Amino acid sequence: MSGKTLSANNNAGGKKVMEFITKWGTLLTILLLFIVFTFGNWNKATNSSIFLTGNNMITILRSISITAIIAIGLTFSLAVNGMDLSIGATANFADFLIMTMFVWYNINMGVSIFLTLIICLVVAFINCILIVKLRIPDMVATLSVMFMFQGVAMTYSNGGAITERMVRPNGEASKGLVPAAFRAMGKEPWLIIIMLAVVAFAFFFLNYTKHGRYMYAVGGNPEAARLSGIPVNKYKILAYFLSSIFAALGGVFIAARVGTAQVNAGAAYLMPAVAAAYIGFSVAGAGKPNAIGTLAGAVLVGLLENGLIMMSVPYFAMDIVKGGVLAIALALTYSQKKNN
């Protein structure tokens, strides 16, 4: 066999390995982390892993549920080649809204959830005016809306937390209580089931409806989509409304899980949601935002946080690891696009 033939075979083999890593690298990383954390948290006294327990697996699923719901909203805006940085502020606003409806105004659960989701669509409305009407770049527009609604939430709550039996800013004692059924929504299995339902909806919508395919067309080449008769602005508006509604839903579940509205509780989900959505680009070689990839990204981020906490890694160092994982995922995604 000649040297050229050997070289060609080596190059072909190397290319196949890179294609495999690019396509399945995220899932392999999840598997590798699972193994590392299982044996890295081994209890010699019981000869078992404190990581690999049923309770801890449920804890991980519960912790990723809200991140995944919010990240699914971001996935819709990414599908039209946009970017919604206001999702964390929207979740925070929803958290405060629904808690005040329970605690301050004693409104029943169904009406409170409905009103919260509807009111939070104001965020989408403002985003669409800035992005679609005024043609401000997505990141700049949604960044300004993020700051705006962080301030709205803080002003509305008078700068403090919302809790049962609190004293309202006007000096009156709050008499409303958080319904037990609402608190149950923030626990397993309901929170996990709803998260899976949201992922299933997004997967079906983006892959099996014309609206989802039109969103991908707008994100891929808006001018070509426009020439094909697709109403580009209409689908951008739809994407940002879906982004806001799922961010608000995430905020509702933050309130259900914690039972209070804490300052900037929703904002803490912005970066994990962004990481999950972008990591999802590389899952199965998709190269584009997708629901299953976003769920895998949320699992990866949640697994990292849980495992690092159990290994006593300081919380302030976790962002270094998450940022590094996101950088690797993006490198895999964009190297695949370059090769294609």
Image (spheres, rainbow, N blue to C red):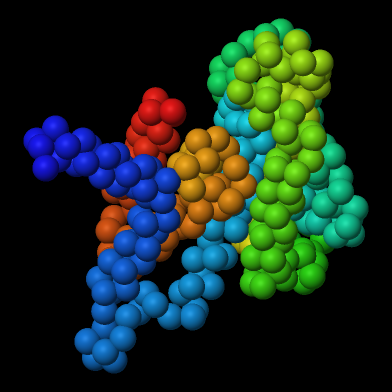
Q: Quadrant of the N terminus?
A: top left
Q: Position of residue 160 (x, y in %)?
A: 62, 45
Can residue 176 be seen here? The reply is yes
Q: Residue at horizontal 79%, vertical 34%?
A: 211
Q: Position of residue 146 (x, y in %)?
A: 61, 28
Q: Quadrant of residue 93?
A: top right
Q: Nearer the viewer, residue 180 or 9?
A: 9
Q: Which of 215 and 77 is in front in this view?
A: 215
Q: In which quarter of the image is the C terminus?
A: top left
Q: Residue at horizontal 49%, vertical 48%?
A: 284
Q: Residue at horizontal 88%, vertical 57%?
A: 110
Q: Nearer the viewer, residue 163 or 9?
A: 9
Q: Which of 76 and 173 is in front in this view?
A: 76
Q: Where is residue 230 in the image (x, y as percent from the top left)?
A: 79, 19
Q: Horizontally, is 40 left or right of 230 in the view?
A: left
Q: Residue at horizontal 29%, vertical 55%?
A: 314
| 132 over 214 or under it: above or below | above
